[in-house]
């Protein structure tokens, strides 16, 4: 009778050990990107933590990407960002680089033209916030499910020294239109749940 109890205890210990190993393996795989939903959530949390919490001197507090089809058949993408100067003095933004995509023009939230993304000259006072919209009109970047971009700001400080802020992580966010919504806007019809038929 005693021998049977020892065998049963050994089998239970083996199963518990196997379960722990499987859980550790799944966590490791999700962090390495083998489970896209888990890894994308981790990446998005890292992006929000960096750009919304620790980036200096320019912080991106909110961002989203919207895409629309123009009457000439091209796609226009608008990357809208709420940026904030985290310095205790003013800074002047000289350029903004976003990749992938060709975001050439920058506007304020009211549609006022701020300039070409590579040649800007707008000032943020200490702790000031500003909504800016970067526009790509060539269809170079219109992801359907969310965006992931490398972001870089060039600026000059109140003391006249130039600075460069390259993101330690990519800026991630939501796209306002899904792939299906974009295709429907183009007049396309989904056939058999698989193929898009477009005019």
Image: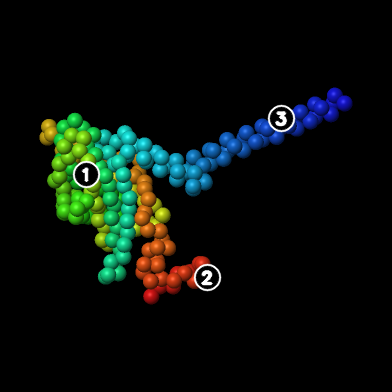
User: Residue 145, located in which quarter of the rendered image?
Assistant: bottom left
Residue 86 percent across, percent down from the top left: 23, 34
- Specify few, some or many for label 1: CA neighbours under 10 Å numbering under 14, 14-19, or 20 or more: some
Secondary structure beneath label 3: helix
Q: Which residue is mark 1?
A: 130
Eyeballing the image, is 6 above or below 81?
above
> Which of the two labelled residues, at mark 1 and mark 3, occupies the earlier sequence position?
3
> Which of the two labelled residues, at mark 2 and mark 1, occupies the earlier sequence position?
1
Q: Nearer the viewer, residue 126 or 39?
A: 126
Q: Which residue is mark 2?
A: 192
Residue 73 percent across, percent down from the top left: 30, 69
The quarter of the rendered structure image containing the C terminus is bottom left
Q: Residue furthest right?
A: 1
Mark 2 touches mark 1? (CB < 8 Å): no
Q: Nearer the viewer, residue 116 or 48?
A: 48
The answer to whether 170 appears left or right of 22 in the picture is: left
Which of the numbered marks, if any, corresponds to residue 181?
none
Secondary structure beneath label 2: loop
Q: Which residue is mark 3?
A: 13
Q: Nearer the viewer, mark 1 or mark 3?
A: 1
Residue 123 percent across, percent down from the top left: 15, 41
- Specify few, some or many for label 2: CA neighbours under 10 Å numbering under 14, 14-19, or 20 or more: few
Identify the residue shown where x is 25% and y is 42%.
83
> Which of the two labelled residues, at mark 2 and mark 3, occupies the earlier sequence position?
3
Identify the residue shown where x is 49% and y is 48%.
36
Identify the residue shown where x is 75% and y is 29%.
10
Query: What distance separates the C-alpha of mark 2 from that of mark 3?
Result: 50 Å
Q: Residue furthest bottom?
A: 199
Secondary structure beneath label 1: strand
């Amino acid at each position: 009778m005693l021998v049977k109890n020892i065998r049963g205890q050994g089998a239970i210990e083996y199963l518990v050990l196997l379960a722990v190993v499987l859980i550790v393996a799944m966590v490791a795989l999700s962090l390495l990107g083998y489970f896209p939903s888990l890894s994308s959530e981790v990446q998005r949390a890292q992006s929000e933590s960096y750009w919304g919490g620790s980036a200096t001197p320019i912080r991106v507090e909110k961002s989203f990407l919207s895409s629309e089809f123009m009457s000439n058949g091209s796609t226009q993408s608008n990357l809208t960002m709420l940026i904030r100067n985290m310095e205790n003095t003013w800074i002047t933004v000289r350029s903004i680089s976003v990749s992938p995509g060709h975001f050439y023009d920058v506007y304020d939230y009211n549609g006022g033209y701020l300039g070409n993304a590579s040649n800007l000259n707008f000032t943020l006072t200490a702790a000031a916030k500003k909504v800016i919209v970067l526009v790509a009109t060539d269809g170079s970047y219109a992801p359907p499910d969310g965006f992931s971009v490398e972001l870089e700001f060039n600026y000059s400080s109140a003391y006249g020294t130039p600075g460069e802020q390259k993101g330690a992580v990519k800026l991630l966010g939501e796209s306002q239109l899904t792939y299906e919504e974009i295709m429907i806007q183009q007049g396309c019809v989904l056939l058999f749940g698989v193929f898009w038929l477009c005019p």
